[in-house]
Amino acid sequence: MAVVWYYLMAAQKIKDKKEKNIERLKKANKEKSEKTKRKILNAIEKLKEQKEEITIYRVSKVSGVSYNSVKKYLHILLSQNEKKQE
């Protein structure tokens, strides 16, 4: 009986540890995503100030963010920006 209880407690500790790790990973991922979005928005503002064409390639080069990440976030950020202006 004590052995079963011991294994149940050990299993619960493992489960708790996994859940904490998952929460930490989610938080880190969200922070990284927000940082990337800020870089993209800053690059767009910089290109606007310089009156340059805003393309995925140019935003990628100015922001230092990969082309695929800019492509992923650009439409989201631009649609959010349009909603704010309305």
Image (cartoon, rainbow, N blue to C red):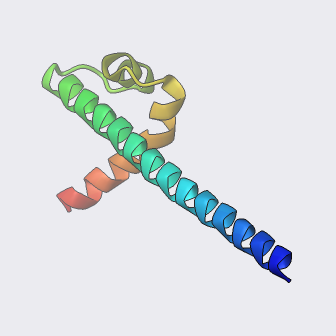
User: Is residue 70 shown left or right of residue 7?
Assistant: left
Task: Pinpoint residue 5: horizontal percent, then vertical percent.
Answer: 78, 79
On-image quarter of the C terminus: bottom left
Q: Kindly give the residue lying farthest to the bottom in the view shown.
A: 1
Q: Is residue 16 above or below residue 27?
A: below
Q: Residue at x 60, y 59 (%)?
A: 17
Q: Is residue 73 above or below residue 7?
A: above
User: Is residue 78 shown left or right of residue 15?
Assistant: left
The front one of 58 and 31 is 31
Q: Residue at x 28, y 38 (%)?
A: 38
Q: Residue at x 74, y 67 (%)?
A: 11
On-image quarter of the N terminus: bottom right
Task: Pinpoint residue 84: horizontal percent, then vertical percent.
Answer: 21, 59
Task: Pinpoint residue 71: horizontal percent, then vertical percent.
Answer: 50, 34
Task: Pinpoint residue 12: horizontal percent, then vertical percent.
Answer: 68, 71
The front one of 3 and 86 is 3
Quarter occupied by residue 48: top left
Q: Residue at x 30, y 22 (%)?
A: 53
Q: Kindly give the residue lying farthest to the front in the view shown.
A: 2
Q: Kindly give the residue lying farthest to the top in the view shown.
A: 61
Labels in figure, total? 0
